[in-house]
Amino acid sequence: MLDEIIFNLLDNAIKYNRAGGSANVEIRRDGARVQLIVSDTGIGIPEEHQQRVFERFYRADKSHSRQTGGTGLGLSIVKHGALLHGAKVELESRENKGTRVTITFRTQL
């Protein structure tokens, strides 16, 4: 399931980026927590849609499905996969600036 989380986050970071933009993956460890952070310099998600993007089949902009071939399932898979691992998902996004998704896992000590 972890591979599906990473695949879907990177797929979105690439699909919704702009020409010449970048996508980054970071792994951080802080005590009993490990964070997976995927960020991009893409089109961003409008604030009014950010609470719903993890819902199955939800698309912030329906026109993008024709351009990118998405179904609206990627972030739902990310959220449910993270929950299966007991992880927390956070989204930060600004239109025309990019998106950052942080998944925080608790490690066993």
Image (cartoon, rainbow, N blue to C red):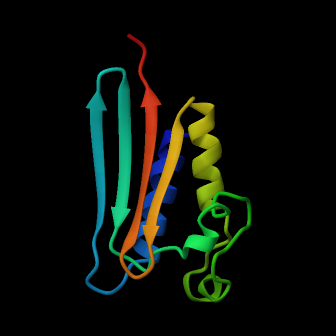
Residue 78 against residue 56 in the figure, above or below: above
Taking depth in this image into account, of 50 and 13 the one nearest to the observer is 50
Residue farthest front in this picture = 48
Quadrant of the rendering where the N terminus is positioned: top right
Residue 80's image quarter?
top right
Residue 66 against residue 35 in the figure, above or below: below
Residue 71's image quarter?
bottom right
Left or right for 10, reference 48: left
Residue 66: percent from the left, percent from the top? Answer: 64, 88
Residue farthest top in this picture = 109
The number of numbered badges drawn on the structure is: 0
Quadrant of the rendering where the C terminus is positioned: top left
- Residue at (48, 67) in percent of width and height: 12
Residue 22: percent from the left, percent from the top? Answer: 27, 72
- Residue at (43, 14) in percent of width and height: 108
Residue 105: percent from the left, percent from the top? Answer: 45, 31
Residue 21's image quarter?
bottom left
Residue 60 against residue 74 in the figure, above or below: below
Residue 37: percent from the left, percent from the top? Answer: 36, 49
Left or right for 87, reference 37: right
Residue 87 against residue 26 in the figure, above or below: above
Left or right for 11, reference 42: right
- Residue at (61, 47) in percent of width and height: 79
